[in-house]
Image (cartoon, grey):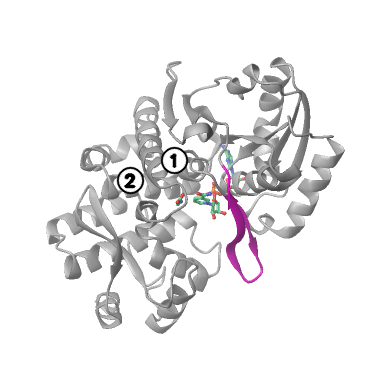
Amino acid sequence: MSNETKIVSVDLGERSYDISIGSDGPVGAVLSGLDVKRALIVSDSNVAALYLPWCRKKLSEAGLEVSECVFPAGEPSKCLETMAMLYDAAVSARLDRSSVVVALGGGVVGDAAGFLAASYLRGVRFVQVPTTLLAMVDSSVGGKTGINLPQGKNLVGAFYQPVEVDINLDTLVTLQNREYRAGLAEVVKYGVIWDADLFALLEQRTDDLLKQDPMLLADVVARCCEIKAEVVSQDEREGGLRAILNFGHTLGHALENILGYGEWLHGEAVSAGMVYAAEVSVAQHGLTRVEADRIHDVLQALQLPVQWRGPNGDVAWSLVLDAMGRDKKTIGSVLKFVLSDRIGHVDFGCVVAEEALAEVFSG
Ligand code: NAD
Ligand code: GLY
């Protein structure tokens, strides 16, 4: 891995921050200029076993008194019971308003630790140290934090920005291949919604991406972070533009919901959802057949699902429609889609008649 660190800035006025992308960089570099004495590292059981000593050492070297709280790995931990455990840990660690929460892990850790930081003492600083590809290119950037309720995913949360995001690409070496590929689905998404050149690069270098070519990975992760930073800077609270980040997610969330979380990883469901959204775009939004096929083909080459009726091809439309209607982003029962008219550009808030959606689904 090259030692060169790339910096991407998220421009949000007084809540602006930098994302550093490299290998083994400083954790919490921004903290050295601030009066911070205590840090609470939040991590999950898998990540802590691999990277907690490294993270603790970095923070101790920066002169911080470090405590830690580790919960069992997996989506079920993004829950109220974990929050209770995190608040206990924050009290035991004697965190005060000048302390910092450090999220070391994937999106589950980042979302829960971010919500701890947003809510404890009405807000303490927090640093994201993402260790999955999905967390590096998506969940660690932009300030969406929260947990699930038994009634649904991400139902409790807050917009709360980190003070810094530290991406250590070397941590991806230990990530399971399937988790890594699921993160690639979100990478493809950025190409479709914003950057045709990025999309073409992904098409040309699928093998290198699957092999985690270090230079390519650093460039691609940095480009995805730039795009997310640009979108979030324009629309922090999803009043409009930020919705484009949900390309492929309307069906993706519905499939996750129907199949039961865990059958397909989030990125896998999003992959199938993007192929479906591309087909709806051909039918309704002027995307050419050739471009829809390119989206399908790059996802297939990255060994991601492209079958939108579920892994066995047997998910019923009635269930999908019902699940899409229950999605928290569905406003006033009108289904809104993000559709593409050409690779590198999408529109949000597209209303599509139910019959048209059903026709593409049964295709
Ligand atoms: P995750 O956090 O569950 O991590 C996946 C698995 O990989 C876990 O078992 C974890 O322990 C393990 N792991 C993490 N890093 C590792 C590493 N370097 N080496 C070995 N194992 C490692 O899942 P995820 O895909 O990172 O995140 C999914 C979560 O992110 C969901 O809860 C989703 O709702 C949320 N999310 C949030 C946003 C946002 O904007 N806040 C965006 C997208 C997704
Ligand atoms: N992951 C979608 C968003 O951050 O808005």
For the residue labelled by badge 1, is the local secondary structure a helix, a strand or a loop?
Answer: helix
Give the residue type at disc 1: Val
- Please give the range of residues in magenta: 145-160
Note whether ligand 2 is within 8 Å of mark 2. Answer: no
User: Quarter holding the C terminus?
Assistant: bottom left
Q: Quadrant of the N terminus?
A: top left
Task: Reply above or below: 170 against 358.
Answer: above
Q: Are marks 1 and 2 in contact (CB under 8 Å)?
A: yes
As drawn, the label of residue 72 is: none
For the image, the number of numbered tags is 2
**Residue that protrudes farthest toward the front in the picture:** 14
Percent x, y of residue 141: 49, 40
Quadrant assignment, res 270: bottom left
Q: Give the residue pinned by disc 2.
A: 190
Q: Image quadrant of residue 308?
A: bottom left
SS state under label 2: helix
Q: Residues within 10 Å of mark 2 (few under 14, many from 20)?
A: many
**Any mark on residue 137, and which?**
1
In the picture provided, is 317 more to the left or to the right than 85? Answer: left
Residue 112, image x, y percentages: 65, 49
Give how far apart the Cα atoms at labels 1 and 2 are.
9 Å
Q: Main secondary structure of the magenta part?
A: strand
Residue nearer the viewer, 289 or 237: 237
| Quadrant in the rendering for residue 64 | top right
In the picture, measured across the screen, residue 64 lies left or right of residue 251, that is right
Type of the residue with mark 2 = Tyr
- Which circle's residue, 1 or 2, is located before the other in the chain? 1
Is residue 38 toward the left or the right of residue 271 in the image? right
* Between 83 and 276, the one nearer to me in the picture: 83
Residue 209 image offset from top left, x and y in percent:
35, 37
